[in-house]
Amino acid sequence: MADIKIPTSFNIDLEFESADIVKRFLAWLIDFAIRLCYFLLCYSVLTSFRMDMDAHLTIYMLLVFLPIIFYFPIMEISMNGLTPGKKLLHIQVVSMIGNSPGISQHLIRWIFRIIETPLYFMFLVPVVVPLVSIVRTPYNQRLGDVIAGTLVISTKRKGSIEETIFRDISNTDYKPQFPQIMKLSDRDMNKVKELLDRALKARDEELASKVAYRVKDVLHIESDLPHTHFLETVLNDYNYYTTRN
C-alpha cells in the first residue's frame, strides 16, 4: 500500500494509505454478489407473475437492469464514497484533496468503470485495464480515478481529516458571519479547534467561554451566540474563506 500525503489549505498534510488491489477486488466481488442476488430475486418475482423478459422488456429494464447498471454511482453518492463492499473491506473513495468527491466525480468514475469492470471473467481486457492502471499509478488509481481526480483509501488511515480544522462545506449554501476571522493564522485556528474539542469532550463550558472571549477580543467581534456555537461558526467561516481563496 502506498502512503498518500494530501496537502490541505491549513498547512497540514493528511496521511492516508491507498487501498491495496486485493481489498478493492474483494469489495467488488461483494458488490457483484449483491447485484446478482438482486437480479435473481427480481427475476424470480417477475416470472412468478408470468412476466417473461421478451414480452416485458421495459419493466425488466426499469426494475432490474437500471438499478444494477447505476449501482455504483447511487451507492457511492448516497454513502459518501462507500458501497456495501467497500464498507465491509474498510476502503473509501475520496477526492484528491481528501474530502468527499462531488457528484460529477462519482459519475466520471462510473463511466470509466464501464470499460474497466470485469463483467465477465472470460474477457481479459476488462480485467487487465484496471489492473495495469492500479499497478502503474503512484496512488494505486484505476483510470476512472485518474480522470475523476479521486483515490480509494483505507479508512484505517494514519491521519484523519476530522483531526484538523477542515470542514467540508463545499456542498452547502453556507453564509459566513465573521470575515474578521481571516486575521488569524492556520496555527491559531488549529489551537481554537484543539481547545474546542477538549471543551466539548470534557463538557467544560468555562474553557469554551474563555476561548470564545479571547477570539472575540482579538478580532473585535460582538456576538450573542453560545460559546461553543460561536467557535464552531468561526471555524466554518475560516474554512469558507480559505477554500475559496
Image (tube, helix red, strand yellow):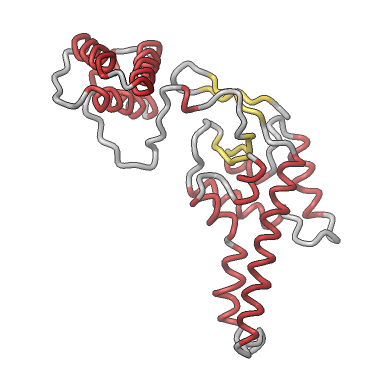
**In front of the other: 190 or 185:** 190
| Left or right: where 195 falls relative to 61 | left
| Left or right: where 27 falls relative to 150 | right
**In front of the other: 67 or 114:** 67
Instruction: Tell me where residue 65 appears, x and y as whole percent.
Output: 61, 71
- Image quadrant holding the C terminus, namely top left
Residue depicted at 71% across the width and 35% down the height: 140
Instruction: Tell me where residue 15 appears, x and y as whole percent.
Output: 59, 23
**In front of the other: 103 or 64:** 64
Judge whether 139 appears above or below 75 on screen. Answer: above
Residue 215 lies in quadrant:
top left
- Image quadrant holding the N terminus, namely top right
Instruction: Tell me where residue 13 appears, x and y as whole percent.
Output: 54, 19
Residue depicted at 63% across the width and 35% down the height: 153
Residue depicted at 67% across the width and 24% down the height: 3
Residue 9 lies in quadrant:
top left
Q: How many marks?
A: 0
Judge whether 194 appears above or below 147 on screen. Answer: above
Instruction: Tell me where residue 103 appears, x and y as whole percent.
Output: 48, 49
| Left or right: where 128 falls relative to 144 | right
Residue depicted at 78% across the width and 36% down the height: 135
Judge whether 57 appears above or below 200 on screen. Answer: below
